[in-house]
């Protein structure tokens, strides 16, 4: 099944494969083969999984096993790399720490389970590392909705420099039919189609906003050029300390919320985000932040609210709330939200934001999974709570006075009871 993949001539490859078909073993062997056949000096290759622990659990033993006959020295257990004869190295990484990759070059990269990675890791981190050595790359995984992995596969279908392949269980026959039949009985149809038949159209299980995002797409509420210069712009921040900070930009127009922009970066100071805001052509009203922005930082002795104010931002605290209350509040608001397509990464995060799954109990937990989608989703939750705080309460209009002839029997009894109770 994987022979065409190993024999390919294209520089890039995208493989969509069902669970337990051996895609990681194939990817590791492909990396070793390409390293051996390369005539480049100081050859460097990377296997990347969504999390470093996951990469170590899934691929490290395979890498050591299959490279053993051609190792130049024992595997480096602390830095997770093997060095082959000729000084060629293959190293294990996690996409959860992209800064560990920056600054180096790569001759080959494999991104395993790319659907679970931040979409920016390819364009902003990996692709530049391949440029000067004209390195190659492989994306492999199982679908999780129409996300960046889907887009990459669609590109591979038409780009002559890319090699696409898809391996659904019904075609590979790698797993016994009785095992597939048992899995089909124990899984939902959507789960089975996604995990074993490589369907990009199956719903992401446990997704909080999957249906709402699909509905927005169907109703045409994801559009281009949504910004209205006549309306003020609000921002909602998820402030990270040592990791990502996500910011949504939005406008309120009557009962509608217009989400016009999104920005996210990792490990940057508040000064960086202030510059980003000033560079955009928006007139700002308020910058909504969570309550932990009031906490004083040990290094500066100032709160992040004070830092924001010193940079001429306009911070305002989002009302305190429980995470699930905020998620449900945003769901209620969804039918009134319009989205600009330039929010691409943020929209993808909302599509994939999902509940954590307990593998032992085989149930979803009451808490979200913390991954690359969390920061954008938290900031969107703050946006929803901020809008609820801003929106004027509906005016309670008194009912018009009714004559006796206009009243029903129940209304007559209610009016009489109210008059009698007022005399007490």
Image (cartoon, rainbow, N blue to C red):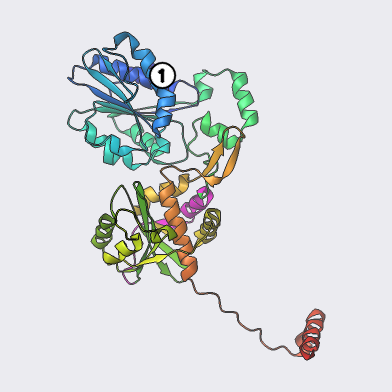
Q: Position of residue 144 (x, y in %)?
A: 47, 38
* Residue nearest the observer in this picture, 81 or 30: 81
Quarter of the image where one finds residue 45:
top left
Q: Position of residue 259 (x, y in %)?
A: 40, 60
Q: Compared to 17, does 128 lie above or below?
A: below
Quarter of the image where one finds residue 100:
top left
What's the magenta region? 210-230
Q: Compared to 325, does 123 lie above or below?
A: above
Q: Position of residue 80 (x, y in %)?
A: 33, 24
Which residue appears at 44% of the width and 41% of the height?
Answer: 146
Q: Compared to 300, does 124 lie above or below?
A: above
Crowd band around label 1 with a 10 angstrom C-alpha radius: few (<14), some (14–19), many (20+): few
On the rendered image, what quadrant is the C terminus found in?
bottom right
Q: In the image, is 367 to the left or to the right of 222?
A: right
On the rendered image, what quadrant is the N terminus found in?
top left
Tell how many labels.
Answer: 1
Residue hosting label 1: 61
Which residue appears at 49% of the width and 31% of the height?
Answer: 198
Which residue appears at 24% of the width and 18% of the height?
Answer: 88
Q: Is residue 328 visible?
A: yes
Secondary structure under the numbered disc 1 in the rendered image: helix
Q: Is residue 214 magenta?
A: yes
Q: Is residue 45 magenta?
A: no
Q: In the image, is 8 to the left or to the right of 377?
A: left
* Residue nearest the observer in this picture, 134 or 146: 134
Q: Compared to 129, does 179 lie above or below?
A: above
Quarter of the image where one finds residue 279:
bottom left
Q: Position of residue 288 (x, y in %)?
A: 40, 63
Q: Is residue 220 visible?
A: no
């Amino acid at each position: 099944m994987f022979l065409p993949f190993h024999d390919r001539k294209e520089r890039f490859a995208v493989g969509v494969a069902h669970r337990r078909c051996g895609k990681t073993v194939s990817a590791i062997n492909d990396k070793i083969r390409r390293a051996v056949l390369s005539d480049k000096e100081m050859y460097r290759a990377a296997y990347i999984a969504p999390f470093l622990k996951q990469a170590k659990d899934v691929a490290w033993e395979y890498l050591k096993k299959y490279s053993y006959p051609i190792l130049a020295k024992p595997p480096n257990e602390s830095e997770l790399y093997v060095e082959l004869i000729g000084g060629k190295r293959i190293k294990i990484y996690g996409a959860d720490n992209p800064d560990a990759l920056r600054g180096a070059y790569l001759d080959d990269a494999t991104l395993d389970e790319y659907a679970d990675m931040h979409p920016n890791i390819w364009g902003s981190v990996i692709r530049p590392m391949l440029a000067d050595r004209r390195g190659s790359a492989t994306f492999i995984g199982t679908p999780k909705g129409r996300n960046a992995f889907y887009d990459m596969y669609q590109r591979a279908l038409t780009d002559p420099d890319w090699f696409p392949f898809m391996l659904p269980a019904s075609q590979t026959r790698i797993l016994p039919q009785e095992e597939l039949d048992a899995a089909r009985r124990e899984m939902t149809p959507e789960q089975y189609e996604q995990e074993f038949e490589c369907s990009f159209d199956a719903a992401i299980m446990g997704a909080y906003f999957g249906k709402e995002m699909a509905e927005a797409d169907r109703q045409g509420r994801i559009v281009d050029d949504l910004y209205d210069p006549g309306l003020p712009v609000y921002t909602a921040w998820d402030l990270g300390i040592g990791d990502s900070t996500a910011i949504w930009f939005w406008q309120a127009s009557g009962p509608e919320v217009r989400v016009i922009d999104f920005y996210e970066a990792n490990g940057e100071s508040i000064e960086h985000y202030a510059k980003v805001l000033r560079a955009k052509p928006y007139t700002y009203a308020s910058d909504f932040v969570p309550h932990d922005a009031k906490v004083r930082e040990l290094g500066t002795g100032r709160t992040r609210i004070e830092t924001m104010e010193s940079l001429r931002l306009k911070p305002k605290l989002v009302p305190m709330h429980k995470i699930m209350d905020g998620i449900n509040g945003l769901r209620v608001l969804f039918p009134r939200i319009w989205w600009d397509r330039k929010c691409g990464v943020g929209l993808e995060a909302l599509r994939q934001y999902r509940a954590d799954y307990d593998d032992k109990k085989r149930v979803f937990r009451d808490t979200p999974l913390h991954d690359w989608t969390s920061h954008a989703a938290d900031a969107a939750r703050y946006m929803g709570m901020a809008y609820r705080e801003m929106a004027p309460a509906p005016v309670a209009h008194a009912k018009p006075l009714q004559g006796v002839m206009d009243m029903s029997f129940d209304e007559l009894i209610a009016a009489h009871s109210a008059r009698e109770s007022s005399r007490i």
